[in-house]
Amino acid sequence: MGYNPNSMKAEEFINNEEILECLSYARKNKNNMALAKEILEKAKKAKGISHKEAAVLLECEIPEINEEIKKLAVEIKEKFYGRRIVMFAPLYLSNYCVNGCTYCPYHYKNKHIPRKKLTQEEIKNEVIALQDMGHKRLAIESGEDPVNNPLEYILESIETIYSIKHKNGAIRRVNVNIAATTVENYTKLKDAGIGTYILFQETYNKKSYEELHPTGPKHDYAYHTEAMDRAMEGGIDDVGIGVLFGLEMYRYELVGILMHAEHLEAVHGVGPHTISVPRVCPADDIDTADFDNAVPDDIFEKIVAIIRIAVPYTGMIISTRESQQTREKVLKLGISQISGGSRTSVGGYVEPVRDDSSAQFDVSDTRTLDEVVKWLMELGYIPSFCTACYRAGRTGDRFMSLLKSGQIVNCCQPNALMTLKEYLEDYAAEDTKRIGEELIAREILTVPNENVRNKAMEYLKEMNGGKRDFRF
């Protein structure tokens, strides 16, 4: 069973022998200056590099090359995403779960975590609380439990979320992070109007995967790993992948996730819309000391930089698992989406005091959304609440072609500024609003297309009068 990115079989497009060969090749060439420079020259074209080339850069010990990797990652991030950072929040619907995942407190053997499942009325209250913060984009999360959390419950919840209009609030994009399912169910999710379907691989090492998932439907490595192919067959063209760094050797995981991206590109003509890079962190009955593959901060930063170089078009997500300091470091290296004001417990947003008794993981960055927005602007970034591409049908290959051609800046830049303006008018603290208004006045002048720029400036003026939801 050899490596084949065009195969639909998990063990062929994520091939263990190929990964081990890549890692061996990288170790042998970790001080090969000529090879590293050759890879970087290829990377400068911003067309990506292969998983094998990425493995060499990750292993490289040459200080000059490592500095060049970071510098190039910054340049590629700016080329594709500018200074825009998309804002979102997770919404946990239920922590009932039948799986035995050893790294997650939702595992079915955990008898002391409070089990909760939101009613539709409770979901409404959570969404209103999120809207009152200023959020426009959610990622819904749920444990895998066919009795308590059937697909019908997820679909009803999505309908509820989209139906709620509170003051000037509205959730305009619902991304979904639920367990691997069937083509038929993915079609139902597509018909429900979801944005991106997200599923973390956790680990690409099959042996480790099966040990970490000893019981439950998630134990099936192939079914889980092939989920994105079924999602795309079901009509979902924006998919998000990720691994949980710390479960297995980070070198193995980096090669695995890049192979997965290459497979999606080869078979479907469009790679992952997003790549997430969470690290194992403490939770209810989870001790990080139980996992001996922890990724130190300097290596984590290098991983983010190399993913940005290898898959230049993908969005990259970092959650509140990471501290403010870590998030700040990796933002410039490749991250394009972050959560803000997040609660990882079921029903957490309506609670005035944070209650993490039903949380999936401990939150390191506990700042409010407004504090995160202000912080981003002070760093020179543009917080974006934009959902325009999804709502205009610019998804999948249509989104990627715009992104890769560089034309998307004429949509993204004004859309980011207009959605930031909405936030400033409706939700921001006075100091945040002052900083934001100065940023918008400065950044609107950088929109390349004159007609778009002038129209956006008109829209911004109309927003002062109370109008909302302009987009290109």
Image (cartoon, helix red, strand yellow):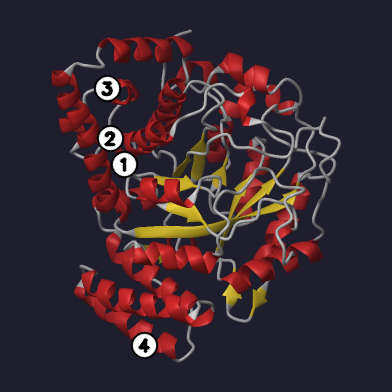
The quarter of the picture where residue 147 lies is top right
Question: Circle 2 sits in a helix, a strand or a loop, which is it?
Answer: loop
Q: Select label 3 or label 4 by which is in front.
A: 3
Question: On the image, numbered disc 1 is attached to which residue?
Answer: 312
- Residue identified by numbered label 2: 48
- Of the numbered discs 4 and 2, the one sitting upstream in the chain is 2
Q: Is residue 226 left or right of residue 353?
A: left
The residue tagged 3 is: 60
Residue at (29, 37) in percent of width and height: 309
Q: CA distance from mark 1 to mark 2?
A: 6 Å
Residue at the extreme left of the image, as rendered: 34
Circles 1 and 2 in contact, beta carbons < 8 Å = yes
Residue 45, image quadrant: top left
Dot 3 amino acid type: Cys
Q: Earlier in the sequence, mark 3 or mark 2?
A: 2
In the shown orientation, is residue 469 left or right of residue 138?
left
| Residue 120 in sight here | yes
Per the model, the C-alpha gap separating discs 1 and 3 is 20 Å
Q: Can see residue 470?
A: no
Q: Label 1 is placed on what type of residue? A: Pro
Q: Amino acid at mark 2?
A: Gly
Residue at left offset 43%, top offset 72%:
420
